Amino acid sequence: AFQLEKVASRAHIVDGLLLALESVDRVIEMIRSAPDQTEARACLMSSDDEQLNLSLDQANAVLKLQLGQLTRLNKDKLTEEKTTLEESRSKLQDLLDNDTTVRNVMIEEFGEMKKKYGIPRRTKIEIEEGELQDMDLVRNSRSVIIVTRGNYIKRMPLQTFENQGRGTRGKKGTSDSSSDNSVAHCFTCNDHDTLLMTTQNGIAYGLRAFQVPTGSRTAKGVPIPSVLPLRADDVITTVLPIAKFSKDEFCVVATQNGYVKKTPLNAFEKLTSRGLVIANLGEGDSLKWCQKCTDGDDILIGSSKGMATRFEASNLRPTGRTSRGVRAMKLKAGDTLAGMNVLDNAKDSEEYLLAVTANGYGKRIKTGEFKSHNRGGSGVIAIKFKSASVEDDVSCFRIVNDDDEVLVITDHGIIVRQKVNAIPSQGRTATGVMVQKVDVDSGDRISAVSIVPTYEERDESS
């Protein structure tokens, strides 16, 4: 509309100039006889003169003409300009009235732009070699990560817990002001490790250890849903620190009701915080353990009633992420699995099975005392319970070495760090010794045991 108005205004002036050139002698005479420019403009606009009768804009344009412009050549130019202006006015009016014309003009203009600028990109955006990532700015230190039953999580430097003797009360690792703060899981890892975090509903999440917010010993931590998209009815049951997703290793998982399966570890290489299904579960079952293994390893499984069985990992056929698995061990009524461990046969003479009961008793058993059998058996006795004690059951089965240390955690958040060799080695049928004093009368129980190898506090670069 603006361009149309501009063309119409110019066409109106050109019409006035052409009228003036048609009567050029009269126009000159009128201008010469007028006493001033105002009178000359009035004469050109006079309605008494039917041939001229110019408008104000036309009269001003005539008065601005120089004598050299009053020629036949200039008249021809003005006539040609008038023809061009009429064509432009017709096209612009068509654009305003006809949508099809608008689209045709757009297609034509875009085609010209493509022809002029449509060339392949001459520059490339590449990742600069040695570009810094978040992980490059974080020291690969050792940390303790605690997950509570209230779905809270926090990370603490390992140096927070100094070595203590066997049988001591220890120091708080969490606040016990509410039942939500009872410890569900505690583990140690490098800050650069990927944490394969599995839930009781069979979902696996991936998270770098340094992405877990830090907290003090008595801090509650942060809600896990603020770190992972965890459902309200789901809780973290196991955490597996992974430095590298190898194609020669497997992820073996076990459920509370005694099912076990193994899946190639590289199936989780693209695991993110959005999560993937790691196992389909039966009704009333929940996923409890997740570890790495190879076909040359053995798997040792123990129940809460003190039974244990050992079988070769190669007897487990690799399955996909969404399979349920097979029966690992026959369980009596009311019995459930209390632990699953992977044994390296080359270290069989050096490793022990650490058994700790909920009431604080524990012992070490040589792994050689558990012979390999077929999967699905009832197992053999791993520990007997104190006959005079309150009803007890096994809280933890862990594979340890002489130079390891352990963090023993109770439901009320009490943590004791002590050397493994301070816990005596006994036979399978022994009842063990007091590992940690537990206030059974107040409802406290041993909830988790984390292994702390002697090299934990060294920096990876040293």
Image (tube, rainbow, N blue to C red):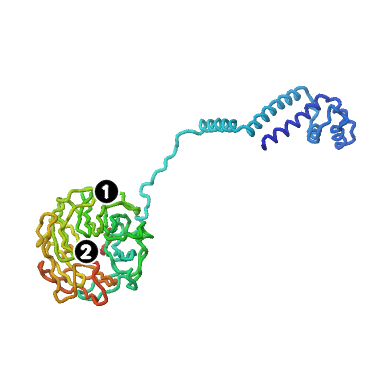
Q: Amino acid at mark 1?
A: Ala
The reply to whether residue 94 is visible in this rendering is: yes
Give the residue pinned by disc 2: 453
Give the answer, above or below, for where 111 lies relative to 268. above
Secondary element at tag 2: loop
Q: Earlier in the sequence, mark 2 or mark 1?
A: 1
Q: Where residue 284 appears, x then y in whole percent?
A: 25, 59
Quadrant of the rendered image containing residue 169: bottom left
Q: Count the labels in the image.
A: 2
Task: Specify whether 136 is left or right of 302.
Answer: right
Could you tell me which residue is drawn at 10 percent across and 61 percent down? Answer: 368
Q: Where residue 130 appears, x then y in whole percent?
A: 36, 49
Task: Specify whether 91 is left or right of 275.
Answer: right
Q: Nearer the viewer, residue 277 or 6?
A: 277
Q: Where residue 231 appears, x then y in whole percent?
A: 35, 58
Q: Where residue 136 appears, x then y in whole percent?
A: 35, 55
Secondary element at tag 1: helix
Mark 1 surroundings: few (<14), some (14-19) or many (≥20) residues within 10 A: some
Q: Nearer the viewer, residue 295 or 256?
A: 256
Q: Amino acid at mark 2?
A: Pro
**Badge 2 vs badge 1, beta-carbon distance below 8 Å:** no
Mark 2 surroundings: few (<14), some (14-19) or many (≥20) residues within 10 A: some
Could you tell me which residue is drawn at 9 percent across and 68 percent down? Answer: 427
Residue 267 bears which disc, if any? 1
Quadrant of the rendered image containing residue 39: top right
- Cα–Cα span, label 2 and label 1: 28 Å
On the rendered image, what quadrant is the N terminus found in?
top right
Could you tell me which residue is drawn at 77 percent across and 22 percent down? Answer: 72
Give the answer, above or below, for where 43 lies relative to 189. above
Label 2 vs label 1, nearer the camera? 1
